[in-house]
Image (cartoon, rainbow, N blue to C red):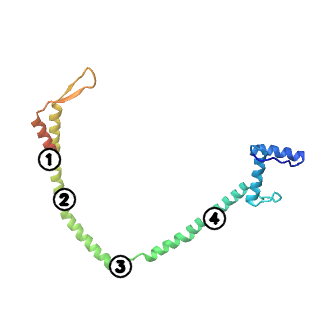
Amino acid sequence: MGTFSNIRFKAKTAARFQRYSRSIARTHTEALEAMLDFFEDNGVSPKESLGPKIVTLENLIKKRVNGLVAIIKNIEKNQTQPMLAMLQLLFEETPSPKKELLLERQSTLKTEASKADSNLIVLALKRENLELNRKLQVSNANLEVLLKNVTVIRNSFGRSQYRLNLSEEALEKIKNHSTQN
């Protein structure tokens, strides 16, 4: 702990300092050191006015930033986007009429070929549909066999259990049918 020294102040100023000191620090020494550090660190003199308060400066900065954002959006809307559209139109390739005629001929040939192919596709889809229906019937039959051979065993304690009453050969046959499909 350092030694103390006396400084003489007017009573009114001393009372004012004591009230202010209690609000910012635990001791008068800490309050006075904080005040001196503030003035030295910020290069401010107590005789100078700080001008507008920080909140006012912050609001002014926000207004200016919002103004800049509005200007940039205006530039983008009125200058950049139209310029980009013009450049895209300039660099866009215009198709020649000869290429269009060639493309039209190819499309008519494709439509004629696609009609023939569509008949083959219809036949293939019908065959696939028949095969899927057959597999569905086999699966339904296997499921029906399984469900007919299930019995419920009720336990007096705990959950009921299900028992499958099929021979191993019959179960293997159902497994083989399901894996083949």
Q: Residue at x 16, y 43 (%)?
A: 178
Which residue matches tag 3?
Answer: 96
Which residue matches tag 1?
Answer: 180
Considering depth in this image, is 179 or 69 the residue closer to the camera? 179
Considering depth in this image, is 167 or 99 the residue closer to the camera? 167
The type of residue carrying mark 4 is: Leu
The type of residue carrying mark 1 is: Gln
Q: Earlier in the sequence, mark 4 or mark 2?
A: 4
Q: Earlier in the sequence, mark 1 or mark 2?
A: 2
The answer for how far apart the CA atoms under marks 4 and 2 are is: 63 Å
From this viewpoint, which residue is outermost toward the left? 169
The answer for how far apart the CA atoms under marks 1 and 4 are is: 71 Å
Q: Earlier in the sequence, mark 3 or mark 2?
A: 3
Q: Earlier in the sequence, mark 3 or mark 4?
A: 4
Quarter of the figure with residue 167: top left
Query: Where is the N terminus found, in terms of image quarters?
Result: top right
Q: Against 175, is 152 above or below?
A: above
The type of residue carrying mark 3 is: Ser
Q: Residue at x 11, y 35 (%)?
A: 168
Q: Which is closer to the viewer, label 1 or label 2? A: 1
Q: Earlier in the sequence, mark 1 or mark 4?
A: 4
> Residue 97, which numbered label?
none
- Where is residue 76 drawn, in percent x and y? 56, 68
Are there few (<14), some (14-19), or many (20+) residues within 10 Å of tag 2?
Answer: few
Asked which secondary structure carries label 3, the reply is loop
The type of residue carrying mark 2 is: Ile
Quarter of the figure with residue 151: top left
Q: Are marks 4 and 2 in contact (CB under 8 Å)?
A: no
Which residue matches tag 4?
Answer: 68
